Image (spheres, rainbow, N blue to C red):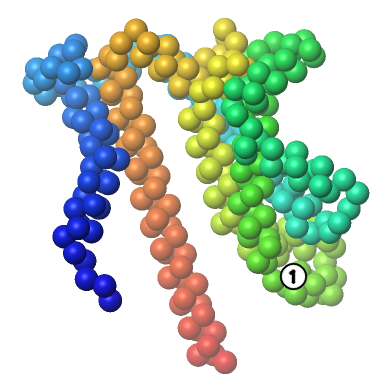
Amino acid sequence: MRRFSWFNLTSLTLGFAFLYLPMLILIVYSFNASKLVTVWAGFSTRWYGELIRNEAFLDAAWVTLRVAVVSSTLATVLGTMAAHALVRGGRFLGRTLFSGMIYAPLVMPEVITGLSLLLLFIAIDLDRGITTIVLAHTTFSMCYVSVVVSSRLVSFDRSIEEAALDLGCTPFEAFRLVTLPIIAPAVIAGWLLAFTLSLDDLVIASFTAGPSATTLPIKIFSSVRLGVSPEINALSTILIAIVAVGVITASLISKRSIARQMQDTRAAIAGA
């Protein structure tokens, strides 16, 4: 094994400091009693209370959460169907065009995507609001789900499906009862990725949002243009805490699942 040198330790420390020190400073100053975000005036939870009473931020957070849940669910369903068609459909007519349309949002600039969707909604006379944001987020996030699920389907052992078909399952039943449970981790990962992308999107949402629907990134961006307020620090701290809890929970669930699989494998080997 290679020794862990001082150079490696220094590089790792500087790298983590570059990534996480700004977040740590933001968290510390979210408990600042002063209105000035750069001047420490003592410990206080005042701005968390102000944030709870700020209806504009709360409404934007509720809109963002609804959009993220609905769009990520739709993107997961459509992305899984697209991945299944690409991997299992063989060489059907229009496959190249279909795959190109699926993967185009991955490399398309967000400004172009947002502008094209805006022109589409104007052309069909669809009022901008939560519906248009959901459609826009579903459009660009389903391709990410398709990539994640496709990578799992490519390595999937099709003999398990064939065995289910030989035992009397219809193709849909084989997919629902056999394939879907096996690829479920990839589907869940795709949903989480789509949820994160929707939660974090600013550019596309700014094109497709209307006066009746403002997402949290748009609200934060419009507030920051007038200066960073301690309420934004408090809001960012809450978001960091939610993400940290989600990552830790997912890690614990993954470790428990791996341990259960290893235990089942040992039991099967012992039984054989």
Task: Name the amino acid type tagged 1.
Answer: Arg
| Viewer-closest of 33 and 174 | 33
Name the one closer to the observer, 88 or 77: 88
Residue 55, image x, y percentages: 40, 11
Left or right of 193, for residue 159? right
Q: Examine the image and state in which quarter residue 244 appears.
A: top left
The residue at 36%/14% (across/down) is 224
- Residue found at the far front of this picture: 7
Quarter in which the N terminus is drawn: bottom left
Number of numbered discs visible in the structure rendering: 1
Name the residue located 60 percent from the left edge and 11 percent from the top edge.
Answer: 210
- Looking at the image, residue 174 lies above or below residue 146: below
Q: Nearest the camera: 137 or 170? A: 137
The C terminus sits in image quarter:
bottom right
Residue 166 percent across, percent down from the top left:
84, 75
Percent across and percent down for residue 164 are 78, 71
- Tell me: residue 182, above or below residue 159: above
Residue at the right extreme of this rendering: 93
96 with respect to 234 (left or right):
right
In depth, the one of 261 and 148 nearer the eye is: 148
SS at badge 1: helix
Q: Residues within 10 Å of mark 1 (few under 14, many from 20)?
A: few
Examine the image and state in which quarter residue 44 appears. top left
Q: Which residue is mark 1?
A: 158
